[in-house]
Amino acid sequence: MDGTLLLFMSICQDIKNMLSCIQYTIIIAVKLANKGMHQNKYKYNKKYVEENVYEFKI
């Protein structure tokens, strides 16, 4: 195995892990937001959900 290829593969693996991690946090955030919306339908709006989803990703 070439050293650069090995490095490239490990970087790809990291990116893949990161992407799936972000994907899961979005799913969790959306689920939590939906749960919150059902509890307080009028208190939550789209902007609130977007801000929270953004916060989850960081």
Image (spheres, rainbow, N blue to C red):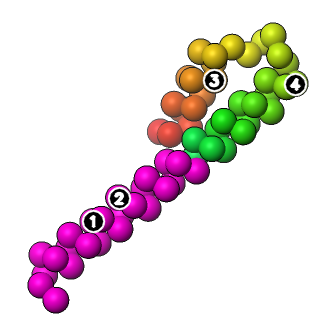
Seen at 64% across and 38% down, the residue is: 29
The three-letter code of the residue at mark 3 reads: Val
**Disc 1 or 3, which lies upstream in sequence?**
1
Q: What residue is at 26 percent from the left and 73 percent from the top?
A: 9
Q: Tag 1: residue type?
A: Ile
Query: x and y percent of residue 38 in the render?
Result: 85, 25
At numbered mark 4, what does the secondary structure look like: helix, strand or loop?
helix
Which type of secondary structure does the marked residue at label 3 adopt? Answer: helix
Write down the region rendered in magenta: 1-24
Q: Which mark is residue 38?
A: none
Horizontal and vertical percent for residue 32? 73, 36
Q: Residues within 10 Å of mark 2 (few under 14, many from 20)?
A: few
Q: Mark 4 or mark 3: which comes first in sequence?
A: 4
Mark 3 or mark 2, earlier in chain: 2
Residue 15 is tagged as: 2
The three-letter amino acid code for the residue at tag 2 is Ile
Quarter of the picture containing the N terminus is: bottom left
Residue holding disc 3:
49
Q: Are marks 4 and 2 in contact (CB under 8 Å)?
A: no
Horizontal relation, residue 3 to residue 23: left or right:
left
The kind of secondary structure element at disc 1 is: helix
Where is mark 4, residue-wise? Answer: 39
- The residue tagged 1 is 11
Is mark 1 in CB contact (under 8 Å) with mark 4? no
- Secondary structure beneath dot 2 equals helix
